[in-house]
Image (cartoon, rainbow, N blue to C red):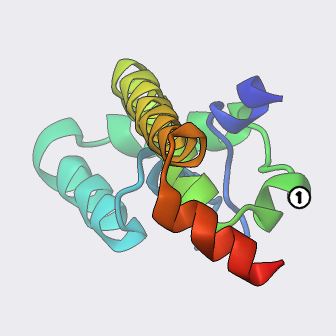
Amino acid sequence: MSARRTKFYLDKRNGKIMGVCAGLADYTGVDVTLVRVGVVLLTVFALGPIAPVAYLVLGWVATDRPRELDDMSDEDARFWQRVRTKPHASVKDVRNRFRDIDRRLADIELQVTSHNSRLANEIDALR
């Protein structure tokens, strides 16, 4: 399942011609307008006729984006973009989140299991 989320797809729904620039924008997390401007600038100033050929080949070879990925929340989309661009950093981020959750759970456990007469009195008052 995760291999499908980390693969490059054409985004024909948000694309203008073949969906290549929209797919690159979705893959990298960069604004689609910046990707389009970058492709035009690369075509004019750097790559010349190679850029349109590469664009067409990429549009021909890449597959369309699956419909199941359209239902992702914005937070999930940002997470998978980070996984695609910096997988090591995303693993570290998940590890840090779990460490933080574990620390908070330990604090709650300490509060509940420690002898706290004020808390015990409040619980008894609720009964």
Vertical arrangement, residue 124 with respect to residue 92, above or below: below
Q: Assign the C terminus to one quadrant of the image.
A: bottom right
Which residue extends farthest bottom? 126
Task: Write down the quadrant of residue 122 in the picture.
Answer: bottom right
Of 99 and 7, which appears nearest the observer?
99
Q: Position of residue 37 (x, y in %)?
A: 26, 66
Secondary structure under tag 1 reads: helix
Q: Position of residue 50 (x, y in %)?
A: 35, 34
| Res. 11 in view | yes
Q: Position of residue 111 (x, y in %)?
A: 49, 47
Q: Say which amino acid is labelled 1.
A: Arg
Q: Which residue is mark 1?
A: 67
Mark 1 is surrounded, within 10 Å at the Cα level, by few (under 14), some (14 to 19) or many (20 or more) other residues, namely few
| Res. 74 in view | no
Q: Assign the N terminus to one quadrant of the image.
A: top right
Vertical arrangement, residue 112 with respect to residue 92, above or below: below
90 left or right, relative to 75? left
